[in-house]
Amino acid sequence: MQKENSLLSLLNSLPLSTRNFLESRTQYSRLLKVIFVACVTWVLFWVFTPSAVALTQIKLSDISYHECPLELAQGAVTSGTTMVANCFIVTGKAENATNKTVYDADIFGRIYDANNNSVMENRNRLGSIQEIPPGVSDFELRISVAANQPVPLKLKQFKAAGFSAPVRR
């Protein structure tokens, strides 16, 4: 009788075991499909990645400045205020050592007055150069300096960085 009950309970649990097995097999199959699709997607993105628009460093040299012509200097005020300002043009040479044109290059640097006070407090980005062809080329940058800051100005740590393709539209 004991054997019959064991056999009967085994036969009764067989459909439950079969159903559990089929459910786990279906879940395992779904998991394998997800992993396969993820791997294929990763490989496709890895193989067909577009070329990166990399940041290119530009060396700036021969940095100097002169006063703006009268037509540019008239009515000059400092950034964010109505304080009277002096207008200056910063000039120099930009060296693009790559064989591609560099676009939208930001110019960074520090400018101090005759007393070694910063002319543009908390501001390192001074302007930009739209396009720099391969080789050495000239650039100019207009700046406004508060009229109460004594000259001559000291231009330090000038550099630029741009992109291998246009980024600003």
Image (spheres, rainbow, N blue to C red):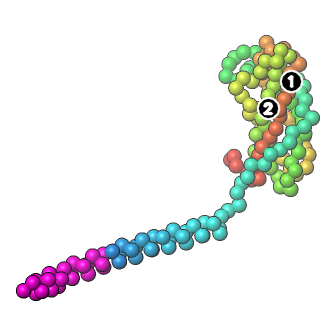
Upstream in sequence: badge 2 or badge 1: 2
Judge whether residue 169 is colored magenta: no
Label 1: few (<14), some (14–19) or many (≥20) C-alpha neighbours in 10 Å: some
Which amino acid type is marked by label 2? Gly
Q: Could you say where residue 161 lies in the image, as x and y percent from the top left?
A: 77, 43
Quadrant for residue 52, please give it. Answer: bottom right
Instruction: Single out the residue that lies furthest toward the top.
Output: 148
> Main structural element of the magenta stretch: helix, strand or loop?
helix
Residue located 71% across and 61% down the image: 51
Residue located 21% across and 82% down the image: 14
Q: CA distance from mark 2 to mark 1?
A: 11 Å
Depicted 146 relative to depicted 47: above or below: above
**Which residue in the protein does label 2 denote?**
109
Instruction: Write the start and end of the magenta stretch as one range.
Output: 1-23
Depicted 140 relative to depicted 167: above or below: above
Q: Could you say where residue 110 lies in the image, as x and y percent from the top left?
A: 79, 28
Judge left or right: residue 150 versus residue 16.
Answer: right
